[in-house]
């Protein structure tokens, strides 16, 4: 969905789907909240678990991230626009999640545009990092007390839409940690509910799966309707504020319901489980971290020299090829070593490297 949003810009195609590819980011946050919380619930009261959690997360994310930053900085300097120290500090500390995107993209980071936008896509990883830093100790130190965790998550879900509504610059606050934390919180709620009640709910959710997937489709249609109603270009400040407060809320509701139903039907012969088990989709998921980092700057760089359609095809092929090589020779070996050297203190390991 994000690839479509970044790559397809032809006006005749936008309204057919790519225009709303940004909704995939909210799905990513919901899935991340679910995954991380599920791991942390398994590790409650296990000695050394929090330390191992952070080591494993660091080994998964940091090597490729900092290698990509090095390439970006060197490439930018090689074309005559060396990045200032404040830009380097901003990105190595993951502080994109706390600075307005307009400041990050236009004031701190100079041109060329492929560097500006190439850096720009990393805001969601910044949100992720601070989620790990804040949420993992909270689950551990409260010993995963459900009442405490669910109260905190409920407050986040209630307050975050108002944060987006009242943010001083309504066009500049969508990519901040405090503006997107409700999607992460929604995934955390699904994890807790599924951990405690999934065995009871599974049969009932399977029975009504088609209807519930219909509800998901209706919620996504509502999000698109809100986008239209507030004008896709968000011409007024009020339109932008209404969109910020409502659309992201509808989306985390949609993706949370989708996740809950999909968990219930997993392992069955339903359409969704069979789709998610496709080898091509599993392969794409495996290389998706590198693909997320490299796809847009490659495309933008090529677009400066090639026709749009040629740049799109060539850029996608290059991004897929680099990502596949990264997994085979860089990320994969690190993941396998991580799995052996830093095993969670539990019989069943929640993350499989390949």
Image (cartoon, helix red, strand yellow):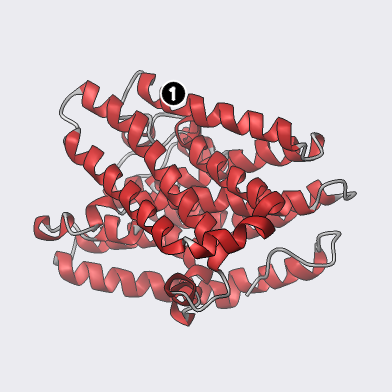
Q: Give 223 or 98, whichever is nearer the viewer.
A: 223
Give percent across and percent down for residue 54.
73, 49
Specify whether 173 is left or right of 36: left
Residue 263 position in % (x across, y down): 57, 62
On the rendered structure, is 225 left or right of 152? left
Circle 1 sits on which residue? 163
Say above or below: 287 vs 133.
below
Quadrant occupied by the N terminus: bottom left
Quarter the C terminus occupies: bottom right
Residue 343 position in % (x across, y down): 81, 63
The residue nearer to you, when weighing 36 against 328, is 36
Relative placement, left or right, of 277 versus 161 is right
**Residue depicted at x 47% and y 45%:** 124
Query: Could you tell me how many numbered marks the image carries?
Result: 1
Tell me: residue 183, above or below residue 157: below
**How far across and how far down the image is residue 272, in percent?**
44, 70
Of residues 178 and 191, the one nearer the viewer is 191
Whether residue 99 is visible, yes or no, is yes
Q: In terms of image quadrants, where is residue 224?
A: top left
């Amino acid at each position: 969905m994000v690839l479509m949003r970044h790559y397809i810009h032809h006006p005749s195609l936008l309204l057919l789907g790519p225009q709303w590819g940004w909704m995939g980011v909210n799905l990513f946050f919901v899935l991340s909240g679910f995954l991380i919380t599920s791991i942390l619930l398994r590790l409650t009261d296990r000695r050394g678990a929090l330390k191992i959690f952070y080591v494993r997360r660091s080994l998964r994310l940091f090597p490729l991230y900092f290698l990509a930053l090095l390439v970006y900085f060197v490439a930018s300097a090689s074309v005559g626009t060396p990045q200032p120290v404040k830009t380097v500090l901003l990105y190595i500390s993951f502080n994109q999640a706390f600075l307005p995107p307009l400041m990050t993209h236009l004031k701190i980071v100079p041109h060329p545009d492929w560097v500006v936008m190439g850096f720009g896509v990393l805001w969601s990883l910044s949100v992720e990092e601070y989620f790990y830093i804040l949420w993992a100790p909270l689950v551990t130190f409260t010993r995963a007390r459900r009442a405490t965790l669910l109260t905190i998550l409920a407050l986040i879900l209630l307050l975050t839409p108002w944060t987006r509504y009242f943010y001083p610059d309504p066009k500049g606050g969508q990519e901040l940690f405090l503006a997107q934390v409700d999607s992460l919180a929604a995934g955390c709620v699904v994890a807790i509910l599924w951990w405690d009640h999934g065995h009871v709910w599974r049969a009932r959710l399977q029975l009504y799966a088609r209807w519930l997937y219909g509800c998901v489709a209706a919620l996504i249609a509502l999000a698109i309707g809100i986008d239209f109603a507030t004008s896709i270009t968000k011409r007024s400040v009020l339109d932008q504020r209404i969109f910020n407060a409502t659309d992201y809320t509808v989306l985390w509701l949609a993706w949370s319901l989708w996740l809950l139903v999909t968990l219930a039907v997993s392992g069955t012969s339903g359409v969704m489980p069979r789709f998610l088990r496709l080898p091509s989709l599993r392969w794409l998921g495996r290389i998706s971290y590198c693909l997320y980092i490299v796809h847009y700057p490659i495309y933008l760089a090529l677009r400066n020299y090639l026709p749009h359609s040629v740049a799109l095809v060539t850029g996608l092929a290059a991004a897929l090829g680099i990502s596949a090589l990264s997994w085979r020779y860089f990320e994969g070996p690190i993941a396998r070593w991580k799995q052996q050297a830093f095993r969670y203190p539990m019989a069943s390991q929640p993350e499989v490297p390949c």
